[in-house]
Image (cartoon, rainbow, N blue to C red):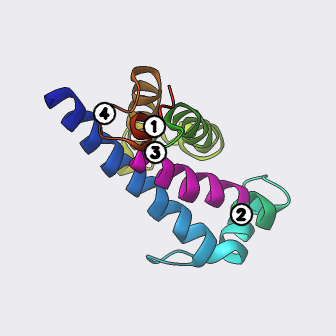
Amino acid sequence: MLLDLGLFLIRLVVGLTFAAHGAQKLFGWFGGYGPKGTGGWMESIGLRPGVAMAVIAGLIEFAGGLCFAAGLITPAAGVLLALVMIVAIAKVHTPKGFWNSNGGYEFNLVLIAAAVGVALTGAGAWSLDAVLGIP
């Protein structure tokens, strides 16, 4: 019971955080720049074509985050979310060091650990995976 509650809380917070970041890229919500603005920035760091890359990253973060929060296809969602963070670390955060306060990869690493940890553990009883019988 407590394990399932813990997994639910982790999935909900981490998943909705990813979904909000995806919404910034896709829709310009929450102070985001939408596909065009995010795409321009992605081009500036060498990810081309920028708008397509923004849409792909945004879709993975938005849909993957919602699936992760709901506990639906959790292993796949967790791995995809971790891959997006690995690209972010490689392209943006590594040169800035570890600490998030300096633009480093600290926060991204925590998100990767949570996403992969839940993907490996399973979503728990309070998930759509459990309701639908998805392993």
Q: Tag 3: residue type? A: Phe
Q: Between disc 4 and disc 3, whose residue precedes?
A: 3
Locate residue 34, reporting x and y percent.
63, 76
Query: Mark 3: few, some, or many residues within 10 Å (few <14, many ≥20)?
Result: many
Give the farthest residue toward the front.
Answer: 132
Image: 60 above or below 71: below
Q: Residue furthest right?
A: 49
3D distance between C-alphas at marks 2 and 4: 32 Å
Determine whether the residue tagged by mark 2 lies in a helix, strand or loop.
helix
Q: CA distance from mark 2 to mark 3?
A: 19 Å
Of residue 35 and residue 125, the one placed in the foreground of this image is 125
The residue identified by callout 3 is 68
Mark 1 belongs to which amino acid?
A: Asp
Mark 1 Cα shell of 10 Å, populated few (<14), some (14-19), many (≥20): many
First in sequence, mark 2 or 4: give its number: 2
Name the residue beneath numbered marker 2: 55
Is the Cβ of the residue at disc 4 closer than 8 Å to that at disc 3? no
